[in-house]
Image (cartoon, rainbow, N blue to C red):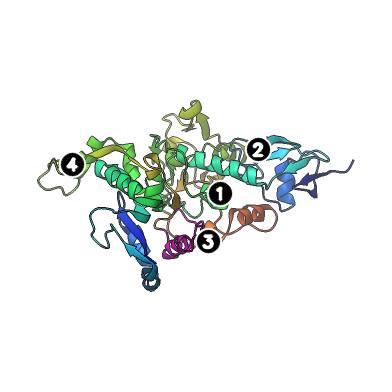
């Protein structure tokens, strides 16, 4: 039987959800009997092939995030929004109080300890969105895994359910927004 | 005529003048609520205590109990409606739990857990609201205010001060402060006021505190909102739960 293909990515996130994913520890060995990874920071594959499950960490803060999210939605049968940022914007959404210009000026011109003040303008840099948005504002999301980050046990729980062909559910004790 | 009503088929007593909520709490029955706190005038604004009374929806915290009344409380349909209300409360403000020092002690968050809320469902508003850090001991972060008026009522009824009120209309409604400058620092609010500690969310918080109890060991990490709120009246007050 062919293995279940999983893709993962971190958009406007901190990779904390990926670190928590790795907190499944030795259970990852068993998991790898049943799954293989496609596009993911763990494989460094740059584009997503058709997959069964896509795990998306982080919200949307720039144009590239939106492209990557659309690629994931197109290629993944099941898309899971992982963590607070993917679900409601999280910590990056704190910039929604300010304009993009104010953020750039604070970070690159007026911030404490800024050397050689200059707002980056390389054409290869993705443009920032005016506000940070959660995933479900742009694509359909199949499941949500809340937490900052969701505990390793929660990843194990949702993946075990999906691998068993069950509708995933989260034990109440694992439901946290922090 | 006997003074009893039925909640989900269970016959419970009530004293004349008690609301459905009063009777339920006294009987140890949990009806979800956010803007209600025993001892303060019921406000009926959060609507999380919506129950079906003889087939019609009503707020349990404001409707007086009457003899023979049949109340549906814990039904799948009502739980779904209440979850949607919690989702709307979340998307209406800036409720970013990982950034809030109230996390784990927040009743709104606990209600989200109670209803199994996984996401906000609706597009978030990300409203622009003013923070007031002018008071030496207390910070007012309107991003997290749910307009429950607990602080308004506590200040008026328990502290005798009238520090807070709701100003504006509709989506522009916001908490205002009764002081010449409109700033908390110029108001009569002091740290020992009930109003300084009653906030069910992280909108009014004492300064210089925050991480005495680590995340993961706080009220709603260890208890459900059901236990905590029924315990407040029926058994004993749980530690760390907001006043």
> Mark 1, residues whose alpha carbon is within 10 Å: few (<14), some, or many (≥20)?
many
User: The C terminus of chain A lies in which quarter of the figure?
Assistant: bottom left
**Residue A118 sits in quarter:** top left
For the residue labelled by badge 1, is the local secondary structure a helix, a strand or a loop? helix
Tell me the residue that label 2 is attached to: B42
Distance (Cα) linking label 3 and label 4 = 44 Å
Q: Nearer the viewer, residue A173 or A56?
A: A56
Distance (Cα) linking label 3 and label 2 = 32 Å
| Whole-percent x, y for residue A122 in the image | 12, 42
> Mark 2, residues whose alpha carbon is within 10 Å: few (<14), some, or many (≥20)?
many
Q: Do the residues labelled 4 and 2 touch (CB within 8 Å)?
A: no
For the residue labelled by badge 2, is the local secondary structure a helix, a strand or a loop? loop
In reply to whether residue A154 is colored magenta, the answer given is yes
Q: Do the residues labelled 1 and 3 touch (CB within 8 Å)?
A: no
Query: Mark 4 vs mark 2: same chain?
Result: no
The part of the chain drawn in magenta is A150-177
> Mark 3, residues whose alpha carbon is within 10 Å: few (<14), some, or many (≥20)?
few
Query: Mark 4 vs mark 1: same chain?
Result: no
Tell me the residue that label 4 is attached to: A110
Q: Determine the residue located farthest toward the top in the rendered image.
A: B169
Q: Residue B35: in sight, yes or no?
A: no
A103 on left or right of B233: left
Q: Residue B111 carries which label?
A: 1
Q: Nearer the viewer, residue A45 or A135?
A: A45
Tell me the residue that label 3 is attached to: A173
| Whole-percent x, y for residue A140 in the image | 41, 43
Query: Mark 3 vs mark 4: same chain?
Result: yes
Label 1 marks a residue whose chain is B
From the image, state whether disc 2 or disc 1 is nearer to you.
1
Label 3 marks a residue whose chain is A
């Amino acid at each position: 039987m062919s293995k279940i293909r999983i893709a993962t990515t971190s958009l406007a996130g901190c990779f904390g959800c990926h670190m928590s994913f790795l907190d499944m520890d030795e259970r990852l060995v068993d998991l790898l009997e049943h799954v293989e990874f496609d596009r993911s920071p763990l494989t460094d594959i740059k584009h997503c092939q058709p997959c069964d499950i896509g795990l998306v960490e982080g919200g949307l803060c720039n144009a590239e995030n939106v492209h990557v999210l659309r690629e994931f939605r197109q290629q993944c049968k099941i898309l899971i929004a992982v963590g607070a940022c993917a679900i409601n914007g999280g910590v990056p959404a704190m910039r929604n109080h300010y304009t993009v210009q104010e953020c750039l000026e604070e970070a690159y011109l007026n911030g404490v300890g800024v050397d050689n003040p200059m707002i980056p303008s390389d054409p290869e840099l993705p443009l920032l969105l005016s506000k940070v948005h959660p995933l479900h504002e742009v694509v359909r999301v199949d499941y949500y895994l809340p937490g900052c980050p969701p505990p390793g046990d929660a990843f194990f729980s949702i993946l075990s359910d999906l691998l068993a062909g069950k509708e995933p559910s989260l034990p109440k004790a694992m439901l946290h927004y922090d | 005529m006997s003074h009893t009503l039925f909640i989900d088929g269970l016959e419970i007593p009530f004293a004349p003048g008690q609301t459905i909520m009063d009777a339920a709490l006294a009987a140890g029955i949990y009806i979800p609520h956010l803007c209600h706190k025993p001892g303060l005038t019921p406000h009926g604004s959060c609507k999380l205590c919506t129950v079906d009374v003889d087939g019609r929806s009503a707020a349990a915290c404001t409707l007086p109990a009457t003899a023979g009344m049949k109340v549906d409380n814990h039904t799948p349909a009502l739980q779904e409606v209440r979850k949607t209300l919690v989702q709307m409360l979340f998307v209406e403000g800036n409720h970013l739990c990982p950034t809030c020092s109230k996390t784990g002690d927040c009743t709104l968050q606990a209600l989200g857990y109670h209803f199994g809320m996984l996401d906000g469902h609706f597009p978030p508003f990300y409203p622009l609201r003013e923070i007031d850090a002018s008071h030496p001991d207390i910070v007012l972060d309107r991003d997290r205010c749910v307009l429950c008026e607990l602080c308004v009522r506590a200040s008026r009824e328990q502290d005798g001060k009238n520090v807070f009120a709701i100003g504006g209309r509709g989506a522009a409604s916001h908490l205002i402060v009764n002081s010449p400058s409109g700033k908390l620092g110029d108001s009569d609010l002091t740290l020992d006021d009930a109003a300084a500690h009653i906030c069910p969310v992280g909108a009014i918080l004492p300064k210089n505190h925050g991480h005495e109890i680590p995340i993961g060991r706080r009220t709603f990490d260890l208890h459900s909102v059901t236990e905590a709120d029924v315990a407040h009246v029926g058994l004993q007050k749980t530690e760390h739960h907001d006043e």
